[in-house]
Image (tube, rainbow, N blue to C red):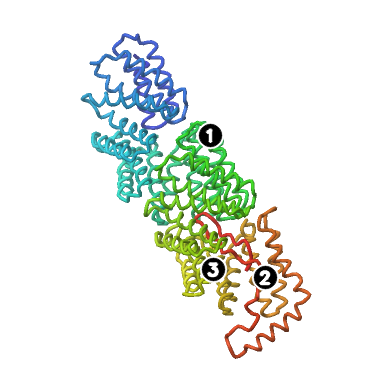
Amino acid sequence: MHFAALGAALQLRFELRGDPADLDRAIEDGRRATVTCPAGHSGHTALRSNLTVSLLARAHRTGRHEDVQEAVSSIEEALRLSPAGDPNRPVVLTNAARAFLARFRQTRTVSDLDQADALVRQALGSRDQRSAWNAYADIQFARHEVTKLPEDLDTAITICRRAVRSEPVGSRRWASSLGSYALLLLHRYRATGGAEDASAALQACEEALPHIPEDGPERASHLAVLAEVLHERHRRDRQADDLLAAVDAMTRAVRASRVDDCETPRRLATLADWSAGTDCPAADADAAIRTATEAVAGATTSDRDRATAFDALASAHRTRYERTGVPSHLDAAVQASRDALRAAHDDLSHHASHLQNLGLSLRVRFEANGSAQDIEEAVETFRKSAATIPAGHRDVPVHLSGLGSSLHRLYERNGNTAHLTEAVEAIRQAVAAAPPGDPVRASCLNDLSFSLRVLFEVHADPDDLAAAVQAAEEAVAETHENDRVWPAAVGNLAVVLTLQHEYSGGGQGADSAIEACDRAVNTPGVQEMDRRRLLGILGALRLKRYQLFHRADDLESGLSTLRAALAATPEDHANRHQLLVNLGSALYIRFQLTGSHDDLRAAIASTEQALTALPENHPQEHLYRHNLELMLPEQRESPKKGLRAWARRWARRETDLPAEGDAECGENLAQAPFDGVRAEDEPRRSRGG
């Protein structure tokens, strides 16, 4: 029994210190013990049960399929040899349940889950039930992953709470049970948004962490759960302190993780994703992405874990693109999304999520480069994700909204109004599926307003415009100033109010729009990329109000706002061309008023720069060239234009009324469509005016 005692000691030391060498030796000694101990010996069953525990621990750390299969085989033999009255049988039954659950998680074979459920129920019928409660909670949560029924998750939480109460306070198993409890509460918080679940999860993490050794193998997982709860609360409440605390907790989780832990690549990728969304130095954010990329590429973890890590990397690259405008981040995002799909080829439970991530990466890249291939593939990918996601799943609104937004962009590329009509219908379904109070609903309402407004511009149906205004107002009402969606929602509301004013000619729509957008720009703590987006919208709105009322201060303030937006946009940002073409249009309008040759030269230069910055074969190229073709002949006529402008100014020197002909300034210029913006998108000012 020497090998048995040594293996047990090594297993215990691994649980305390987390050294994988101890676990490997425990498995080897356990195998030797089962070989040397006769099958009829009273201790043979316990030896096989202990070997199963060690194999499952290594499988959890490394994701090795062969360890799980060996664990199942070993525990099946232990069950066969264990008589009904054996005092060790409840423990054997519990370990057997864990082995079948582990195999279910790898293969998704429901019969394994059913077998695990039946075994743990037998264990719960014994007097010593403590070790079975945690296993039972894990099995019920796995059942919830299959059924998606909220009651299965509620049952798992209730069982896990009982498991916590069954352990001595302050013990290692008590702390471990608290960590499992916090994780289950996190899942329910994500599904329902219940603030009490977030508070209870945070409290459970804070109570457990002091009782877990600094170098213990479970410390990293507890810190990761703490980070995930804080990040989810930040996503809902938009408190900057929560994001910083989440990044700090995940940083500590990464430091506590071993290099060969199967969770390490995913944690690194998640940390890179979150860091990319903060105001940390660019060099630090890019270094985090590089480190995570190397870790994920070299990982030998389960396909499911690698797929999750690849999705986090894709999100990190998209966020970095939003902040920097560097197109290579979009190429990396698309590649990471494809890698996630390949890694999860057999994981049907998360297939829709990986498809949605790829569709988003492709659509954002289309918005940067105008590639028809990208947007067509994005639409098809979102169609698959929307068809794959189970009805009633909490992510249904995200998939439907993604499909609608991609169809809208496809309409912009090919002009097929059937795609625009389908986009509106898909986003309406997304709004209907989103629960009140969920941040996703506000984003869906914003997307709906955007597409309805464009549908109005196509068909001139006032009902579409009224619905666009209503959706925009609801989107703003359902967000607050700390919400990530709020700047985009305010900007979009400003656009539709201005359009309504222009269409109806009544009310104070333009003034209300500019006030709302100006308030959003000057909100304390607004992120730089949101401020840049809103400045572009505000500049265009002021120019539009100038065209409605011919107030000279609107033209000047519009120009200065567009220049501020341009100054805040990196030189190599993929969307810089949109601001350049709008600035060129504004300068051309002022030239038509003043006859200033400097304004004309600056307008031509700005439009030429926009064309140079425009990606090859971009769908808006012909509109940019149209603007330039209007400007170039004016170079020869500018002296005469200057005299006409001087005459108009002289004629109205005693009045604020516009002179005859002023309303025609910029009339032949391709007008800005006042594109709505989504929470994750940059504004698309595709035409001048």
Report x, y in % for residue 642: 72, 81
- Residue at the outermost bottom position: 654
Q: Which mark is residue 343?
A: 1
Sequence order check: which comes first, mark 3 or mark 1?
A: 1
Q: Which of 430 and 68 is in front in this view?
A: 430
N-term-proximal mark, 3 vs 2: 3
Q: Which marked residue is nearer to the observer: mark 2 or mark 1?
A: 2
Q: What element carries label 1?
A: helix
Q: Is residue 262 above or below residue 507?
A: above
Mark 2 highlights which residue? 668
Q: Position of residue 666 (x, y in %)?
A: 65, 72
Determine the CA span between mark 2 and mark 1: 53 Å
Q: Residue at x 77, y 77 (%)?
A: 637
Q: Closest to the observer: 180 or 655?
A: 655
The kind of residue tagged 3 is Leu
Q: Quadrant of residue 41?
A: top left
Q: Is residue 216 among what the camera can see?
A: no
Q: Dot 2: few (<14), some (14–19), or many (≥20) neighbours within 10 Å? A: few
Q: Where is residue 111 in the image (x, y as percent from the top left)?
A: 38, 25
Amino acid type, residue under disc 1 in the picture: Ala
Which sits in the foreground, 419 or 122?
A: 419
| Residue at numbered disc 3 | 538
* Nearer to us in this view, 65 or 415: 415
> Within the image, what quadrant is residue 645 found in?
bottom right
The residue under label 2 is which amino acid type? Asn
Numbered disc 3: secondary structure: helix
Relative to 669, say whether 74 is above or below.
above
Disc 3 + disc 2, Cβ < 8 Å: no
